[in-house]
Image (cartoon, helix red, strand yellow):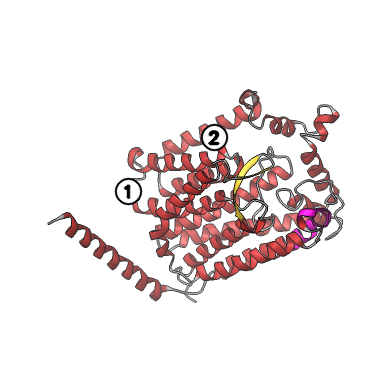
Amino acid sequence: MTREEQRQIKKAREREERRKRQEAWEAARGPMDIPFLLLALMLLVIGLIMLLSASFPSAQAHKSSNYDPLYYFKRQAMFAGAGLVAMFWVSKINYERFRGLARLALIVSIALLVLVLIPGLGITRNGATRWLGIPGQAVVQFQPSEIAKLGVIVYFAESISKKREKMRSFREGFLPHFILLCVVAGLTLIEPHFSGALLIAGMGAAMMVVGGIHWGWIAAGVGGLCGGGYLMLFTDLMEKIGYNASRIAVWKDPFGGDLEFQRNQAWQVIQSLITVGSGGLLGVGLGKSRQKFMFLPEEHNDFIFAVVFEELGLVGAGLIMLIFALLVLRGFWLAIHARDRFGSLMVVGVTVQIALQTFLNIAVVTNFLPATGISLPFFSYGGTALSLQLVEIGIVLSVSRQIPAPKAG
């Protein structure tokens, strides 16, 4: 038998497998998971309301937003609408079809991360080159790292699900995925985008753990993470290599040092802590934040949850954190009950991303961790991130359609 004949037979088998999977999808397809959908929609609506409240002072004060107090809100609402359409469309697709796009998604993700580092192509803001698009045209700009998160989720889910019996092997299971994770996270780190690299590494590692890698590599990873965290936070390593050393100093004591240190390096963290503390138990009232009037930097982006604390208080912020927690728990429940390993791993990837990103953002806002420039899902301003988050919600809903409903009685 010639190689061409072997290839034809292989393609025929793949077509037959796809046909059978589609038939199984049609036969087992049910309604999407309503609790997960409602929790996501609640966060989206609350996020848009808080974005409007947090952003109108800075939008009204800057020429870049045409002095329009609704500028950020209208743009975010536009992306939210497009994301919702994409979410419901994706939720109706047989998620098995994403298997065929897995390798392409990873290749495109790596290519875009490389392009953003090429001088003249990447767009730089605040010392970081994280965007591609047309300079000065915010409508057509996007962050490749956001696409890379989705690419890693789909590719790892497809690859790990196929190598179920090989994942405990170092050479065939652990090493290839570890190298790919280092490449994607490393390209993101070079931008520099430390929080994005941390997210990609975290969710990729979680999917590998769920995929069944040997416990020894899990222990080594946890040990390496703890050791690296200690070196970065409690030694002068960051100062020696010159990477974000000032952020470590601010985290340790934002109110220490001289007045210049507080006004320059520590200003954002100090204002965030003041904003959080100003809310007290019940908050000053929706829309009544004082710190958002040019005191708190990035009030509509990375530090929007500080405004939530000030306006809604500890009670309101706690309820929002509870909704996030319920969304994450429901996501893991769906992963446990997914029809197959591929769907389960995709849900795990999406859920871990939301959980890790939410935790890191709130930890930064309260100075529990050093500032990393990480956004809050569904709340922070950013069209690319919001649209892709809703697409990921659509993937989870697509997987949930294959979960049989519990029988009455």
Q: Label 1, label 2: how many angstroms apart (C-alpha)?
A: 27 Å
x, y percentage for residue 202?
Answer: 53, 44
The verdict on residue 95 being magenta is: no
Residue occupying the far left of the picture: 1
For image coordinates 80% across by 42% down, the residue present is: 273
State whether the magenta stretch is mostly helix, strand or loop: helix
Q: Secondary structure at mark 2?
A: helix
Measured along the vertical axis of the image, is residue 189 above or below residue 79? above
Q: Which residues are magenta?
A: 49-64
Q: Secondary structure at mark 1?
A: loop
For image coordinates 42% across by 54% down, the residue present is: 104
The verdict on residue 60 being magenta is: yes
Question: Which residue bears the numbered disc 2?
Answer: 225
Look at the image and tell me in which quarter the N terminus lies: bottom left
Measured along the vertical axis of the image, is residue 18 above or below residue 314? below
Say whether disc 1 or disc 2 marks the residue closer to the N-terminus.
1
Looking at the image, can residue 280 be seen? no
Q: Is residue 3 left or right of residue 114?
A: left
x, y percentage for residue 370?
Answer: 68, 37
x, y percentage for residue 173?
Answer: 36, 43
Residue occupying the far front of the picture: 120
Instruction: Say what amino acid the circle numbered 2 marks.
Output: Leu
Instruction: Say what amino acid the circle numbered 1 marks.
Output: Glu
Q: Is residue 223 left or right of residue 319?
A: left
Residue 165's disc number? 1
x, y percentage for residue 25?
Answer: 39, 71
Looking at the image, can residue 334 be seen? yes
Asked if disc 1 and disc 2 are in contact, CB closer than 8 Å, the reply is no
For image coordinates 42% across by 39% down, the residue present is: 179
**Which of 369/246 is in front?**
246
